[in-house]
Amino acid sequence: MIAGMLTSSLRTLLPWTLVLAAFIGCGSDGVGSGGSLVGGSCIDNYDCEGQCLGGGDFPGGTCSVSCRDDRDCPEGSFCIDKKGGVCLLPCGSVRDCRPGYDCDDKDNKGISGKTFVCIND
């Protein structure tokens, strides 16, 4: 029974792991842990293509864009119900996030449900 649950969990996580590897590891610009659109660190809005989110939820700042739902977010990010709706990077574990960030499930904006994203909330 435990082996069956592990197999099912791995089957569910594997696609997300591949997606995260493609987006989190890259991103000197655009989307990812170094992205100037979503996910990169920032001091102010001049460091980002969109906006720089700061404060306790976003240590070291994080680049993002405003959204009403996932369609407003660049590929590889999701619309989360924080600060009126912001695009954040998905994660499968804290290892997928920049230092200082956790991998927490947060309410989606525009649709029901939650998504695991990198945030320090």
Image (tube, helix red, strand yellow):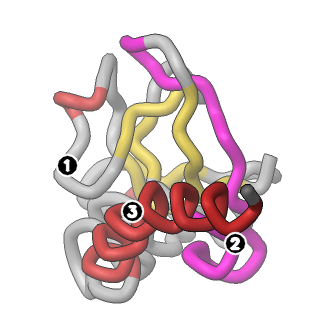
Q: Which mark is residue 16?
A: 3
- Look at 61% across and 59% down and name the residue there: 4
- Look at 68% across and 59% down and name the residue there: 103
Q: Does the magenta stretch include residue 104?
A: yes
The disc labelled 3 sits on which kind of residue? Trp
The span shown in magenta is 92-111
The disc labelled 1 sits on which kind of residue? Pro
- Vertical placement of residue 67 versus 78, above or below: above
Tag 2 residue: 94
Q: Which of marks 3 and 1 is in front?
A: 3
Horizontally, is 75 left or right of 81 in the view? left
Question: Residue 8 location in percent, x, y?
Answer: 52, 56
Q: Which mark is residue 74?
A: 1
- Look at 22% across and 78% down and name the residue there: 29
Horizontally, is 96 left or right of 57 in the view? left
The disc labelled 2 sits on which kind of residue? Val
